[in-house]
Image: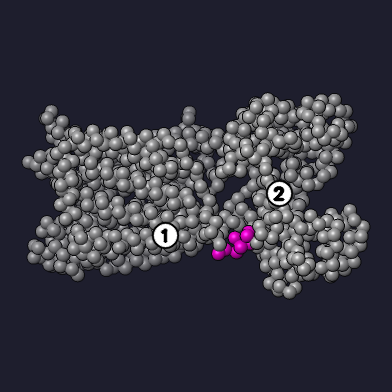
Amino acid sequence: MPRDVARQFTDFVTTHNRLVIVVMVVLTAGVGFGIAQDQGDVDEGIDDDSLGNTDVYDALEYIENSYGESERDDESTVTTDVYVIADDGSTLERETLLTALEYQKQVLEAESVREPLTADGIDGVPNRVAITLLEEPDADLEAQYDALESASDEELEGAIAAVLAEDEFAAFYLSATADAGESNAEAFRMTFEFEESAGDPETGSPAFEIEQELFETAGAYESPAIYVDGQPVWAELNQRLLSEIAWLVIPAVLALLLVILGFAYRDLTDVLIGFAGTVVALVWTAGLMGWMGLLNQTTAIIAPILVAALSIDFGFHVFMRYRERRGPEDPIRDSLRRSTAAVAVAFVLVTVTAVIGFLSNQFSPVALIRDLGVAITLGVVASLLIFTTLVPALKVSADGLWERFGYDRRKTALGKGRHISRVLEIGVTLARRAPIAVIALVLVAGLVGGLAFADLEREAWQQFDPDDVPDWQTELPGPMAVETHESPLVEQMEYVQTSFQTDQEGLAAGGAGYTTMLVTSEDEDAGIATSEGMAALERGHERASEADEAIVLSQNGEVRVISVLTVMEMAAAENESFAATLEAADTNGDGVPDRDVDAVFDELYEVEPEAADAVLERTDDGQYESMLVQVPATQTYGSDRAAVMNDIAGEMAADSDLEVTAVGPGTINEAEMGEIADGIVWTLLLALAGVLIALSIVYRLVHGSFTLGAITVIPIALALGFVFGGMYLVGQPLTMVTALLVSITIGLGIDYNIHLSDRFCQELERGQDTVTALREAVTGTGGALLGSAITSGGAFSLLILVPEPQLTSFGVIVALALGVSFLLSVFVLPSLLILWAQRTDYGLSSGSSPRAEGGG
């Protein structure tokens, strides 16, 4: 029944080829218009409820509930940070301070900046110094500039010293290498604060137009350099890098495609028709994404690339099967109708199973991965439509035109060549002689590879490291040279990320400038107001001061940890009564109370209630349930930050009844990756189960066999194991992007297996014996699979040239998945199929025994 429908459909397409072309062109124009729709936003976050079972999320929720109200003000502003960086020497000099004020005055000339700026919206070292000189907190920028310009050297030095004496201000506004005591700093920060109405609700930052004005104005300053930390910088660098990547990769990919397609097809017309089909499939994919609001920077790159790979595969099967089916006397239309009908059912099976594999990502906790699953599904369905309608219609029209001019359009299929067929027949030989040994060997290897999944490194994302760019890429001629990583913008960005805190807020106040250690006690009766609790805090301070300075921010050699110890130190310096209480509770003179801790905390609340409330949790009955330790962090994210912070937390909790949980961007990302890793397992299991059920049902309807569906799925499960093992061997981490790519392996890999098993059954149904049917399937369909694998895999492997690690991983994993899937389908699946044929009486119309034909 399905094949009858396929024959009727392809008969209409090949008979009314001109009408089909016109209709598809019109539909393509309408669908393609969706590309012009507004792009959606990229939501790379993980669903909040998916973190509910992790210790980090529990601690985060606890902190927000217990400390959030006391720390978090009613936020009504958004802020952009601007950095002044000296080429040589210190930024705390008159000329540099005047340059900074000049920049401030210049940006305020733009209404887009001036109007939403709050009353005291600009703050920084030059402003504080000028206000100190004037002793007028409300002085405008003109007055501040005049004060700095006219002050004597002695007055200026005194004002700078007075401003930097405020430790908290200096820690945030000066670079990590600054020496406040010597009034020396390589860089300082200025903050621009705007009304919340001028912010972008998605990013929590000022609107792009505001930051763009700040960014463009800063571009005119070179000595000192002025760097704006905001969206325009990322947009500029991404645009440059994408342009360089395009010039580096696209010419190489196009050249490779032309060489491989030219070799595989050996016919320019077929190359052009196949290429046209792929382009139209990409237009449909992007257009449908646009109409559904799924088109954004990420989906616009990943989905089309994967759809292009599948389209190339569909094209090979259409053309190669046509070449096999057209005999010396066969007309074009009849041959193409029969050949397209033969592959159409396989195309539908591929589409159904690929859709199951891709839509299984709807169970992912990451919104971006769910969107990509839908986007790729749309592309797969579009490819099915185009390569069963437009491409056959174009092929009929083109070949008919050429033959009217006397050119013979009969060509040899790729797998039927003398040399290639010998290689492909190795799988048939193995299947005849030792199928069980082949299957056993591959099962063991796949299982070993699958076990590597547990040992894969987990990261939220892979960071671009300029040091990883090969020298030869920077020396390429013209626009092909990769030079973005050497630009002043990147140097300034890296300096800021390693030399300044993200912000001044702790986690409870919604900031990321500190990683927060939540300290609680397993003994509810004892609480945390104990000598053991104080010793843990002391260990935390010591461990933070020794930690990696690339992760924990060190200000001129000092790590400014915030905890109840620092609050007590501040209170003792300002209140003699509390100083006496603290001294009495400190038996060894190290400044840390080791007895009567409850009483010390009680008096601390009396003299510094707000500061105490920010680091201590006190219940209504006066018990102390928890405390916070804030460890200042650089703007570095990823697994290294999580490891360092978890080490500090572990040191604090060692040999005690305390529980210490590190909560910050790094540890939250680590928890997210743990959930994503678990999600991958469930996604793969669901996808495999869905594919197994779907194939079993469809094969029962088409070929009368449930078990053939299971046989076809086995190589996909093995392919996953090999891909995990390959990722481990080449050092590819498990990230949000690679997690998606691994799950896509099912959608890509099942394609090869379906084509081969379906062709095998067709040959059996035509009366071939088992071995002959297998040989025809492997050399005929296997040739198309070879061309597809080499073309798509080769193109993806060229992404290894890209210095951006996310794209490199993309290329490596997809090329690995395609290569493994091809090898398993051509060299392992035949062994499974021959055993299946032996244990069923499928297709033995010729009366020959599979075993008698060498199927043992």
Instruction: Tell me the element at label 2.
Output: loop
Label 1: few (<14), some (14–19) or many (≥20) C-alpha neighbours in 10 Å: many
Of the numbered discs 2 and 1, the one sitting upstream in the chain is: 2
The C terminus lies in quadrant = bottom left
Q: Position of residue 434 (x, y in %)?
A: 24, 66
Q: In the depicted view, which residue is nearer to us: 28 or 446?
A: 28
Among the 4 quarters of the image, the one containing residue 536: bottom right
Q: In the image, what residue occupies the spot 51% across and 47% down?
A: 43
Q: In the depicted view, which residue is nearer to us: 387 or 752?
A: 387
* Secondary structure that dominates the magenta span: helix
The answer to whether 716 appears left or right of 239 in the picture is left
The verdict on residue 6 being magenta is: no
**Marking on residue 683:** 1
Q: Looking at the image, is 89 positioned above or below residue 376?
A: above
Q: Looking at the image, is 363 positioned above or below residue 707?
A: above
Instruction: Tell me the element at label 1.
Output: helix
**Marking on residue 721:** none
The answer to whether 600 appears left or right of 809 in the picture is right
Q: In the image, what residue occupies the spot 46% across and 60% down?
A: 679
